[in-house]
Amino acid sequence: MAKNYKETLRFPDNFLWGVSTSAYQTEGGIVCDWSGWEKSLERIKGIKKQGLDPEDFICDKACDSYHRYKEDLDLVKDLNCGVYRMGVEWARIEPQPEVFSEKEIEHYRQVLKEAKKRNLKVVLTLWHWTNPVWVQEMGGWANKKVVEYFLVYAKRISQELGDLVDFWVVLNEPMVHVFNGYIIGKFPPNKFCPFQAYKTFRNLVQAQRKVYDLGLKSPVGITALINYFEPAREWCFLERSLASLMHYFWNHKFLKKIKNHIDFIGVDYYFHDRIVWYPPFRKNLNEKVTDMGWEIYPEGIYYVLKYLGKFKKPIYIMENGIADAQDKYRADFIKDHLYYAHKAIEEGVDVRGYFYWSLLDNFEWAAGWDPKFGLYKVNRKTFQRKARPSAKIYSKICQSNSVEI
Ligand code: FCB
């Protein structure tokens, strides 16, 4: 696809511009399945073996957003964003089964009120992979009972905070939890067990459906990590079939099951995979990669949006971002993805918002503190936030509702 670099592309009126974060990656001081795993001897041993420092893989105080949320919300405003995606932490709110912490619920009410004071809309994520320790002890999401507990939690949060929430994300990227947790073991509970993976998949589907059926006042959705899989060689039947198969299992199957239980689709786009028929089945060109080695492939978002358009639901790009410590590619990364999002909109796909991941450099899960996704740098000792040059460019985009390319 040829790019025309001499245009100003305007986005539809009322298009939402935002940034995304999650509770665990930013708040600090959370005790849950993840924090336990990070500090486990096995994990620490594994990291040392690679010659790395275990401290760089422990979330601990994160960005201290639990205490600095007002400052964070001011930064969102400085970006001229109209919406902020944040999360609430189940483990904080419900430290024991059906024992809720009034104090923590009140804390989140304060955060949301501060967002409203600044005239920000809020997307609230209920579950972003982390679980209370008691959920972990029950066997995690592979246990059907967890669905019922989750429902009690979701109901309580919707009663307590619902008046301040504009959009609900029930689950963040459930397929990542299933695959990383139960197939490749990279995330807690660090297993290889296809049967438990299947049960977890099924229970997460149920969770989404049941929370939707609570009939919350604001729109309810999900965030799905949608990859753009394409055959390395269009003429090769095997590669075409493999790419379709991967698309089906990774992108489509979960969405198909919950499509009647979402008011909108939140899409997270980071990955492009060029599929070959021989191991490791992926051969990307990698002309440009992020600090995490992920291929930068903006046109992929166009195909992903075209695919999602078929569900006939409003779409919000709820995560798109780059690990780029030097801020070398970030501004172009955003612009190029917006170029292709705009193209999809022009072709009739109902895309209603774009959220950059992430506001801050935060704790990047199994990859620890090294990847820098933030529009703002965060000093790990003082927690001081500092805008990267790309923040200015993004703020201009948000303010003008357009992108110059
Ligand atoms: C997404 C996660 C988010 C963040 C980005 C880089 O898959 O939802 O928490 O880690 O990747």
Image (cartoon, grey):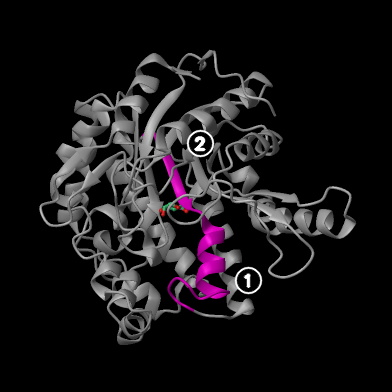
Give the x, y percent position of residue 198.
63, 71
Does residue 202 appear to the left or right of 292 in the view shown? right
Give the x, y percent position of residue 293.
50, 56
Residue under the point 30% across and 26% down: 392
Tell me the residue that label 2 is attached to: 317
Q: Is residue 110 visible?
A: no
Disc 2 crowd rating (10 Å Cα; few below 14, some 14-19, many 20+) is many
Residue 120 vs residue 317, the one in the foreground:
317
Hey, what amino acid is under mark 1? Tyr
Q: Which mark is residue 198?
A: 1
Look at the numbered disc 1 and say if its residue's Cβ is closer than 8 Å to ligand 1: no
Q: Is residue 66 visible?
A: yes
Give the x, y percent position of residue 364.
36, 58
As displayed, is residue 322 above or below residue 103?
above
Question: What is the magenta range?
Answer: 166-190
As displayed, is residue 361 above or below residue 368?
above
Hey, what amino acid is under mark 2? Ile
Label whose residue precedes the other's in the sequence (2 or 1)? 1
**How far apart, in angstroms, are the residues tagged by discs 2 and 1?**
27 Å
Residue 185 inside the magenta-drawn segment: yes
The secondary structure type at the circle numbered 2 is: strand
